[in-house]
Image: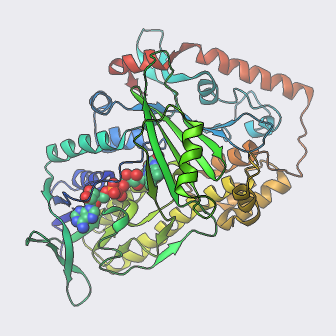
Amino acid sequence: MNEIKTIVVVGAGSAGLLSAMTLKRAFSRLDVKIVHSPDIPVIGVGESTTAIFPPFLHSSLGIDFVEFFTAVQASWKLGVRFVWGDPKDSHFNYTFDSCMSTKSPHLRKAAPYYCLSDWSDASPSWALMDRGLSPCFRRPDGQTAAQVAFGYHIENQAFIDFLTKKAVECGIETISGNVADATQDESGNVEQLLLTEGRSITADLFVDCTGFGSQLLRGKLDETFVSYRDSLFCDRAVVGQWQRSDPRDPVLPYTTTETMDHGWCWRIDFPSHVTRGYVFCSAFCSDAEATAEFKSANPQLNDDIRVVPFTSGRYEGFWRKNVVAIGNSCGFVEPLEATALHLVVEQIRMVCRLLSETDLRLLPEMESIANRQYRVLWDEVRDFLAVHYRFNRKRDTPFWQHCRENTDLAGAADFVELYQRFGPSTLGSTTLSGENVFGYDGFTTLLVGQRVPTDYQPLLFESDAKSWLDHQNRIREYIQAALPMDVALKQFGTATLD
Ligand SMILES: Cc1cc2nc3c(=O)[nH]c(=O)nc-3n(C[C@H](O)[C@H](O)[C@H](O)COP(=O)(O)OP(=O)(O)OC[C@H]3O[C@@H](n4cnc5c(N)ncnc54)[C@H](O)[C@@H]3O)c2cc1C
């Protein structure tokens, strides 16, 4: 097998740009090119990340924090505030600071046991979220530093413009052109891309980042699609935004996820504007009905409202022959946990790890190794989202009744069963893969947060109640040094990353 010398990435959305830059940084001797259509726009949505994203950008890709923040006008995300679950509760938070799995030396048991009855200020991020404070703290030496785990809110087009500039800076050639077809050799490997403009482009490895079009994986290699329709019923989103007019209007440091009649609605805050998106199920309401409900819940919305259709599912494999597909071209799950960019990062790392192991040679075994990991990765995200739909009792509409009765918990069924029997015990971890994106912490947050019934009766003593109160008070004291969002956003240029 010959060494891979050239890689062509098709597509310059966030998946294409991040893939190209990661490959170039991992293997500087590679010739990496991007070809992208001047006619097919990027998806234009996708603004919320998980906590792996900032370290990936700044450490793995070496992107300067201040340069990024200045160019993209991003904001911090401490977690997700769910207006979800039990109708008696206002909300619960899913934080990035491992709230449920952190064991304090001052507590006899892990946090979720106490959270069953009182989980206000259960962790620093929880307390920051409920007060609208930033992850940046003023230190005794006067410096400002981000001290808790965070993700980003990033506007899709601004991020792509920034990444395009950085890709050119790191030596990646960008070619404008529409890929119409590809030729294959006798073993099925793609040899060259054929552009409508009459040009052809050869490479040793092709990365398909063509979004929902999946030009190479599905279009050329005819990969089978595996639907998630038994667990995830939503298939459209109506999206819109409004500009901030009142400077006193706070920029919220989290994504809000709110139950609607036929699905749910996100709210993402930026310093200049707020975006909203209503993810709904077309079997229960039309675009016009969803838009009407969306507008009535958000009267501030601009007129620029659009509907984005999608299908939740993945392909049988993302790696076939000398083609790997990353981003929407290899699968999509609805954005309830904002996992798309997370999966892009996981998959491109998987590709880099395998190429590094083989010294940039394509061996037949790589395909099955990578596809096995990919299937586990994606199916576990589907499983986690299913838990959200199965147990949400916030509204009693036909859509939510249908979800409660019909959502297939798939791979999450064992975790849920153990929880129903033993409460928030760590036994549940044994049902998850070691690489699970959400892990014990995520599943437990969703089960405790939605107040899913359990046979477990907490055996807590008076001294435990006192320890929990002390724990909460320590957190309240700790966050005294946290900066309000408006102050932190103005000072980001001086903040450092811990
Ligand atoms: C409603 C909704 C909300 C979302 N929210 C989030 C979120 O909060 N967080 C998150 O992480 N993700 C979210 N996503 C997903 C996210 O938008 C995408 O996964 C991410 O932006 C990556 O997109 P992409 O690069 O795969 O595709 P795209 O942005 O669609 O880019 C495709 C690229 O391929 C090019 N192309 C296509 N066909 C051809 C061709 N034939 N020849 C040449 N070039 C071609 C296009 O020109 C474009 O450059 C959301 C998605 C939806 C639908």
At horizontal 20% and vertical 69% (from top left) the residue drawn is 179
Q: Quadrant of the C terminus?
A: top left
Q: Is residue 186 left or right of residue 426?
A: left
Give the total number of marks visible in the rendering: 0
Q: Nearer the viewer, residue 22 or 488?
A: 488
Q: Quadrant of ligand 1?
A: bottom left
> Where is 230 relative to 395, above or below?
below
Q: List x then y, in percent, for residue 395.
A: 74, 47
Relative vertical location of residue 112 with respect to residue 179 in this rendering, above or below: above
Q: What colour scheme was applied to this rendering of the protein? A: rainbow
Q: What residue is at 76 percent from the left and 63 percent from the top? A: 405
> Quarter-wise, where is residue 38 in the image?
bottom left
Q: What percent of the width, then of the height, locates residue 304?
A: 39, 42
Q: Residue lying furthest left in this view?
A: 198
The quadrant of the image that shows the N terminus is bottom left
Question: Where does residue 325 sit, x and y in percent of width and height?
Answer: 34, 67
Between 199 and 298, the one lying in front of the other is 298
Q: Position of residue 383 (x, y in %)?
A: 62, 61
497 left or right, relative to 129: left
Q: Is residue 8 visible?
A: yes
In the image, what residue occupies the spot 59% across and 18% down? 479
**Left or right position of 423 against 181:** right
